[in-house]
């Protein structure tokens, strides 16, 4: 909040020197225990302002709506202050309210006002605008208010202006209503952060934040956990962002109990109340502020109750939120209008909240903790939102990784806790890296899932077989005249037909069936229908043609390959010694090791493609959520499983001149299970791999991954695949990833999270291929069921720090002289409920109490 000082008594004629003393800590620091960088210094603009001795001290605009939410109800209270040593008489206040095309809608002139010395006086104007253009995040219509003060001679002595938006925000029938509509808050928490300047964020950087938010369907921000730079509010007014405006109060270091929290200590009452009211006074004229938030993680008690009451005395036209209200306290009076339990799990809300609360909505003030590779099961949150009218969204924690630019041996990286502190000093590691974008605003792959789930247009495929898609406009205020619908027919991963359909200006909260002329489908082929809503309007910050919403529908699913499908093959020559079995065909040679049963060599035209054998693997480089749920320690048995594996059976058999079979059995003692790996080698070099893992007889933790790992020659760095993409996706985070054929370099599969961890995974894959520059390589084709994979230019071990995080950054990750390929049956989800204990949801976990099996075919591609 701003600090103002009257310098007048200290000025001298001529040149003056202004000096500012900054204190790193004060008693107020006990109320500023936020989870972010503790950076000292001046972080707001500093300026000198000369005012007339009689001037406009304050004004309060109330731009509301009538009971029918149709007409604008305007009131303006202006306060004059007189700093003269005598009264100031015959002052006049004039105001004018114009639209942005300079058309005047309201204007007025006050009576002649006299103000006693060192006194103040208020004057109020009122007016109504018929069929006013309302403000919302969807349609941020603004008017310009001009206020002028004239002296007794009719001269303008001071003038000011502000943008005004007409809207209401209220709680009715247990819902938060804006302009009478039960909006959904598709929000993020946002700390003020800049990778170069810390807490000082430029106006251009603020616009970049809003631009990304708009493009990714984010419509709300909680100013966690303090009032933001005033410029931020003006920009949110202009571009349309709903705000939870939060007071600078957080004292969780003291605890929440009645006898601990500062919120229950009388000597801290004025500090609590004044911080909340100062926020209200500064930001009261901004339409983007739809909810006041009294602070964060500060316990509760008499001080917050008093602040709640004082807010309503000053501004009774916005709801008030405080997450800790009415918990662990003897205060029985209501002092929050919204339940916002942070990180409340979906099943708890159903069980605890929805069964008892009818008067207040539920809106997560923090949820879906986005630390590192996260944002799993995000769709499930919004399945709950869409199924219950009192659950109205929430604010993801949080917007941006709070990295600071640092350098190591001349290379830039994003620094976090522990990179600056002397050894031995306490730090919180990378716990400030919880964003859906990097510190440079590069979107995390999870943000695409957020965009998909947050989208405001829904596509219903219940009539898709009849050639119809039902489209629902989930907006509350704007029709769809700014959009056009695009459809694509995808055959076996490639677009074969497409077209556009006019939206017909579909009204808010309505739906309509649209005919999609995709035509006849061929037998035996796989088809999907892709639907897109494209921006065709001229909206600030959103490019023309930008995809605002999307959906994919399966039309016809063809069976996956289950035979080698080769009509003419050549004979195989089998050469065997005590260590290996070598199978030779035309232009290829395949080798299996007798010591471990693994496929250890694949040579095409004299070139070795494998850099290491293909072996079972059960481990992934731990994500931040994995560390939070103690996967490195709790599930370490699966990391050790690969080294506990031994070959117990190696059987071989020639079936005919062009077919050879190898069956292996691997015993994994530390998890008391057995894996059967069978290989059918064909005369054209194809290998059908059958993997079966038997259920274990002992109770074990979840299995991070079930699959096979091999390393390929580094030149096989051209990836093509038919599955979900193009961005990284996981079993609990893949609704935004469409099935299609994608091409990339292997190096582009790597996403450099601020702390290295598991990344680049793909799900629902029909086939994948890795080839060199001339097209030679290997293709893996799924049999009977889809597979999953990672293909990265480094070893998994480069991303795995072990039992602790070790302050690693992408600079610590070294590229290898191979491509590491994981061909997985399953990988567990990444989770996203929190990063301090929550596992992925049970439906996205895999345990060793059942059998697992899958198959795929390795196909060579020659020059």
Image (cartoon, helix red, strand yellow):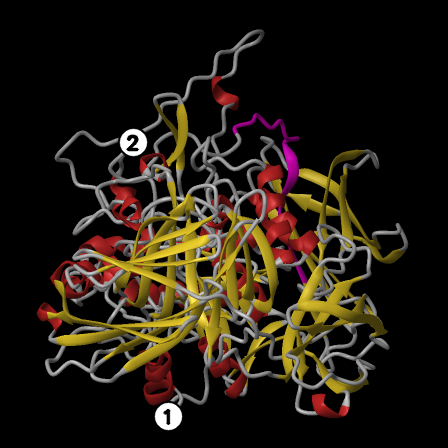
Q: Residues within 10 Å of mark 2 (few under 14, many from 20)?
A: few
Please give left or right for residue 201 compared with residue 414 in the image: right
Q: Residue at x 57, y 75 (%)?
A: 567
Residue 694 at what x, y percent from top left? 21, 81
Could you say which disc has been placed on residue 147 in the image? none
- Give the residue displayed 33% in from the left and 64% down from the top: 304
Q: Is residue 152 above or below residue 74?
A: above
| Label 2: element kind | loop
User: On the image, which quarter does residue 578 sit in?
Assistant: bottom left
Magenta region: which residues?
Answer: 46-62
In the displayed structure image, the side of residue 339 where residue 541 appears, left or right:
right
Magenta stretch: includes residue 637: no
User: Can you give x and y, in whole percent of width and height, for residue 26 in the image?
Assistant: 27, 37
Q: Is residue 474 left or right of residue 254?
A: right
Q: Confirm or deny contact between disc 1 and disc 2 (CB under 8 A).
A: no
Q: Residue at x 70, y 52 (%)?
A: 238
Residue 714 shows in the view: yes
Residue 204 rendering spot, x and y as whole percentages: 62, 38
Which of the numbered marks, if any, corresponds to residue 24? 2
The mark closer to the camera, 1 or 2, is 1
- Say whether disc 1 or disc 2 marks the residue closer to the N-terminus: 2
Residue nearest the viewer, comparing 828 with 243: 828
Q: Is residue 47 magenta?
A: yes
Q: Position of residue 856 (x, y in %)?
A: 43, 71
- Image height of 814 relative to 742, above or below: above
Q: Is residue 510 visible?
A: no
Residue located beneath label 1 in the image: 355
């Amino acid at each position: 909040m701003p600090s103002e000082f009257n310098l007048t008594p200290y000025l001298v004629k001529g040149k003056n020197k202004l000096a500012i003393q900054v204190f790193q800590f004060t008693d107020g620091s006990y109320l500023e225990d936020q989870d972010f960088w503790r950076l000292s210094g001046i972080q707001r603009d500093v300026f000198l302002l000369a005012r007339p001795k009689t001037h406009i001290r304050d004004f309060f605009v109330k731009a509301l709506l009538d009971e029918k939410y149709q007409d604008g109800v305007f009131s303006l209270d202006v306060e004059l202050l007189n700093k003269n040593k005598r009264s100031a008489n015959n002052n006049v206040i004039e105001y004018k309210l114009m639209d942005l095309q300079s058309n005047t809608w309201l204007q007025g002139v006050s009576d002649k006002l006299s103000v006693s010395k060192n006194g103040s006086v208020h004057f109020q104007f009122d007016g109504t605008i018929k069929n006013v253009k309302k403000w919302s995040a969807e349609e941020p219509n603004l008017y310009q208010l001009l206020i002028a003060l004239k002296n007794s001679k009719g001269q303008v002595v001071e003038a000011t202006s502000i943008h005004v938006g007409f809207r209401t925000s209220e709680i009715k029938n247990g819902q938060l209503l804006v302009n009478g509509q039960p909006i959904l808050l598709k929000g993020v928490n946002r700390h003020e952060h800049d990778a170069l300047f810390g807490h000082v964020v430029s106006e251009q950087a603020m616009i970049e934040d809003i631009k990304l938010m708009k493009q990714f369907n984010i419509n709300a921000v909680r100013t966690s956990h303090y009032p933001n730079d005033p410029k931020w509010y003006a920009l949110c007014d202009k571009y349309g962002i709903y705000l939870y405006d939060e007071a600078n109060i957080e004292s969780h270091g003291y605890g929440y109990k009645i006898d601990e929290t500062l919120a229950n200590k009388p000597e801290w009452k004025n500090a609590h109340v004044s911080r909340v009211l100062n926020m209200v006074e500064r930001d009261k004229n901004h339409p983007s502020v739809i909810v006041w938030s009294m602070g964060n993680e500060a316990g509760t008690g008499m001080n917050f109750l008093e602040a709640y009451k004082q807010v309503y005395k000053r501004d009774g036209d916005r709801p008030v939120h405080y997450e800790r209200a009415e918990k662990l306290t003897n205060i029985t009076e209501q002092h929050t209008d919204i339940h916002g339990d942070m990180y409340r799990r979906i099943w708890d809300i159903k069980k605890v909240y929805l069964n008892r609360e009818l008067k207040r909505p539920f809106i997560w003030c923090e949820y879906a903790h986005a630390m590192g590779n996260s944002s799993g099961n995000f769709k499930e949150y919004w399945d709950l939102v869409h199924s219950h009218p009192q659950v109205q969204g929430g604010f993801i924690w949080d917007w941006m990784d709070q990295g600071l630019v640092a350098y190591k041996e001349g290379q830039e990286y994003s620094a976090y806790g522990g990179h600056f502190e002397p050894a031995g000093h306490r730090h919180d590691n990378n716990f400030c890296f919880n964003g859906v974008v990097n510190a440079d605003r590069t979107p995390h792959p999870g943000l695409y899932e957020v965009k998909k789930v947050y989208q405001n247009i829904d596509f219903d495929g219940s009539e898709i077989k009849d050639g119809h898609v039902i489209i629902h406009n989930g907006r509350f205020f704007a029709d769809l005249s700014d959009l056009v619908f695009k459809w694509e027919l995808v055959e076996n991963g490639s677009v074969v037909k497409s077209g556009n359909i006019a939206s017909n200006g579909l009204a808010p909260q309505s739906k309509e069936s649209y005919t999609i002329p995709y035509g006849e489908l061929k037998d035996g082929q796989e088809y999907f229908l892709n639907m897109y809503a494209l921006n065709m309007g001229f909206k600030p910050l959103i490019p023309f043609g930008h995809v605002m919403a999307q959906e994919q529908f399966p039309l016809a699913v063809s069976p996956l390959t289950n035979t080698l499908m080769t009509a003419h093959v050549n004979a195989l020559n089998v050469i065997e010694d005590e260590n290996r079995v070598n199978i030779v065909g035309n232009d290829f040679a395949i080798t299996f090791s007798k010591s471990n049963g693994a496929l250890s060599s694949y040579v095409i035209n004299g070139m070795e493609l494998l850099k290491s054998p293909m072996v079972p693997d059960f481990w992934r480089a731990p994500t931040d959520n994995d560390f939070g749920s103690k996967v490195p320690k709790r599930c370490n048995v699966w990391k050790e499983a690969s080294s506990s594996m031994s070959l117990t059976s190696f059987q071989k058999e020639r079936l005919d001149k062009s077919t050879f079979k190898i069956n292996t059995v691997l015993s994994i003692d530390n998890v008391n299970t057995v894996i059967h790996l069978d290989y059918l080698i064909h005369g054209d070099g194809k290998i059908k791999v059958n993997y079966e893992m038997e259920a274990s007889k002992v109770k074990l933790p979840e299995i991070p991954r079930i699959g096979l790992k091999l390393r390929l020659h580094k030149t096989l760095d051209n990836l093509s695949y038919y599955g979900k993409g193009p961005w990284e996706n996981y079993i609990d985070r893949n609704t935004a990833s469409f099935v299609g054929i994608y091409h990339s370099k292997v190096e582009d599969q790597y996403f450099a999270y601020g702390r290295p961890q598991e990344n680049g995974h793909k799900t629902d894959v029909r086939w994948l291929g890795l080839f060199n520059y001339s097209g030679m390589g290997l293709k893996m084709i799924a049999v009977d069921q889809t597979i999953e994979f990672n293909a990265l230019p480094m070893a998994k071990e480069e991303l795995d720090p072990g039992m602790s995080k070790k302050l690693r950054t992408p600079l610590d990750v070294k590229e290898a002289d191979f491509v590491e390929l994981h061909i997985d049956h399953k990988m567990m989800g990444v989770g996203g409920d929190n990063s301090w204990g929550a596992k992925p949801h049970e439906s996205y976990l895999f345990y060793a109490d059942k059998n697992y099996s899958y198959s795929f075919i390795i196909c060579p591609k020659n020059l």
